[in-house]
């Protein structure tokens, strides 16, 4: 039975020892370590949050980059097709213009040729008249008056032209 | 332990078969009971320093030296011993304090941590040959349970006020005619759980040691190599079991203290 009865002296020493131990450890060990555990927990939490935020930011930046890239591609494509169309149009215009110019030149040349021909014919007409007068006077040996000549030549020419 | 046993057997005239049984019981009780190392009776009180008190001082000295050294300037990234003990402290915080005390756990952590490590070290030191188990002494466990009792009442009164705390001990909404029964029941209940706390720790530690010393006595009673060999295996097993029990009882003492404090603080559940 002695085993089950608390001895007050030992009980007193137990309480005193424990309270002193508690006070000493609280100051020298528990406070610093509990503070540190709390601080560490806080820091880990913050670091995780920061890492999460950084990842989100990176993902956002990546998405933005991709978007920009796609837009740039689209723009380049657009620009390319636009310039191609422009080049096509310019080419067509130039060709058309060249064709027009060419046809203009040709028609002008034709006109000039026609005019020259007319002129040549006119020249030929007048020279032929003089020549024929000369020949005729030489053959006939007598000269006719200028008015006679003209009349004869014009009528013969008219005949010639009509015959032509 | 063995040399002590030899001395004891010689002192008590061992070897006579007729006294074997009584001798065994004496031997066991001799190692369970406390012994006065230094008599001191100031003002008529018996404040003698006994072996168990001395063991508590050794445990306290070890705890102060160890924890003051490794925890004085804790590092953000711990290493070595500090890492090991920080893991234990974090475990106790997560398993013993936070589930019951929640936000208040920081306030009661020093008490619960001290209780855990003190009880654990006293338990473990008791396994060292030639030492004594302070926590296998009802006076010591009563002292510890008394401190938990005071902690619990203090926590309850601090949180709910003197009147509120004692009113909250009785579940609200009871019919008046039950009160004459409930008031004494709750009043007794206030103490019984703490008495149980003291007896649980004491009985667990004593039981293990009784088994160890009984097995030792078997060797010297039979004086046979065969029996000695088998008993030795049993001793080894029980000693390992004792290490486990030392841990479990320290854990139980601190978790129950935490639960009792939590019950006094949160009286509504």
Image (spheres, rainbow, N blue to C red):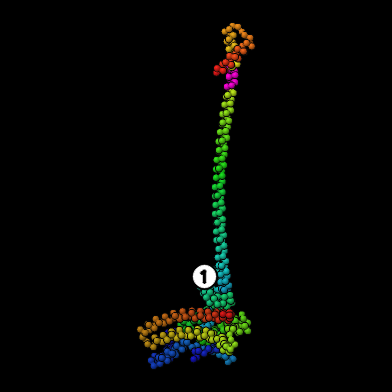
Magenta stretch contains residue B128 = no
Report the quarter where the C terminus of chain A lies.
top right
* Residue A82 picture quarter: top right
The correct choice, above or below, for B74 with respect to B18 in the image is: above
Badge 1 element: loop
What segment carries the magenta color?
A117-124
Q: Residue furthest bottom?
A: B18
Q: Quadrant of residue A58?
A: bottom right
A73 or B1: which is nearer to us?
A73
Image-based side of A36 in relation to B128, left or right:
right
Q: Position of residue A28 (x, y in %)?
A: 58, 76
Q: Can residue B183 be seen at all in this image of the molecule?
A: no
Asked whether A69 or B214 is in front, the reply is: A69
Write down the chain letter for disc 1.
B
Image x and y of residue B222, in percent: 37, 87
Q: Quickly name the residue at label 1.
A: B79
Q: Residue at x 41, y 87 (%)?
A: B217
Predominant secondary structure in magenta?
helix
The residue lying at 55 percent from left, 40 percent from top is A88
How many numbered dots are placed on residues in this image? 1
Left or right for B15, reference B102: left
Residue B126, percent from left and from top: 48, 82
């Amino acid at each position: 039975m002695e085993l089950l009865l608390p001895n007050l002296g030992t009980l007193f020493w137990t309480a005193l020892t424990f309270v002193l131990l508690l006070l000493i450890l609280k100051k020298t060990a528990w406070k610093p370590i509990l503070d540190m555990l709390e601080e560490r927990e806080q820091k880990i939490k913050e670091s995780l949050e920061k890492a999460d935020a950084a990842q989100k930011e990176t993902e956002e930046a990546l998405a933005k980059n991709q978007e920009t890239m796609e837009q740039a591609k689209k723009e380049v494509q657009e620009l390319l097709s636009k310039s191609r169309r422009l080049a096509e149009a310019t080419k067509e215009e130039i060709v058309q213009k060249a064709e027009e110019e060419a046809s203009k030149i040709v028609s002008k040349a034709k006109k000039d040729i026609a005019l020259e021909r007319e002129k040549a014919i006119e020249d030929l007409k007048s020279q032929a008249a003089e020549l024929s007068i000369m020949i005729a006077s030489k053959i006939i040996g007598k000269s006719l008056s200028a008015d006679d000549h003209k009349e004869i030549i014009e009528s013969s020419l008219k005949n010639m032209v009509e015959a032509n | 332990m063995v040399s002590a046993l030899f001395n004891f057997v010689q002192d008590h005239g061992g070897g006579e078969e007729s006294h074997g049984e009584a001798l065994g019981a004496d031997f066991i009780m001799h190692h369970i009971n406390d012994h006065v190392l230094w008599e001191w009776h100031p003002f008529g009180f018996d404040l003698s320093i006994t072996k168990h008190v001395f063991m508590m001082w050794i445990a306290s000295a070890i705890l102060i030296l160890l924890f003051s050294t490794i925890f004085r300037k804790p590092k953000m990234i711990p290493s070595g011993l500090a890492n090991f003990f920080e893991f234990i402290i974090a475990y106790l915080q997560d398993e013993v304090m936070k589930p019951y005390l929640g936000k208040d756990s920081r306030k009661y952590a020093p008490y619960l941590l001290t209780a855990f490590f003190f009880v654990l070290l006293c338990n473990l030191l008791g396994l060292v040959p030639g030492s004594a188990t302070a926590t296998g002494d009802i006076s010591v466990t009563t002292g510890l349970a008394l401190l938990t009792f005071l902690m619990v009442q203090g926590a309850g009164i601090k949180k709910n006020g003197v009147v509120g705390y004692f009113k909250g001990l009785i579940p609200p909404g009871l019919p008046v005619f039950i009160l004459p029964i409930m008031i004494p029941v709750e009043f007794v209940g206030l103490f019984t759980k703490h008495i149980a706390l003291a007896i649980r720790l004491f009985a667990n530690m004593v039981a293990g040691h009784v088994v160890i010393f009984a097995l030792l006595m078997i060797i010297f009673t039979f004086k046979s190599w065969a029996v000695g060999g088998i008993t030795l295996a049993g001793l080894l097993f029980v000693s390992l079991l004792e290490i486990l029990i030392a841990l479990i009882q320290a854990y139980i003492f601190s978790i129950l203290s935490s639960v009792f404090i939590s019950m006094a603080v949160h009286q509504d559940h």
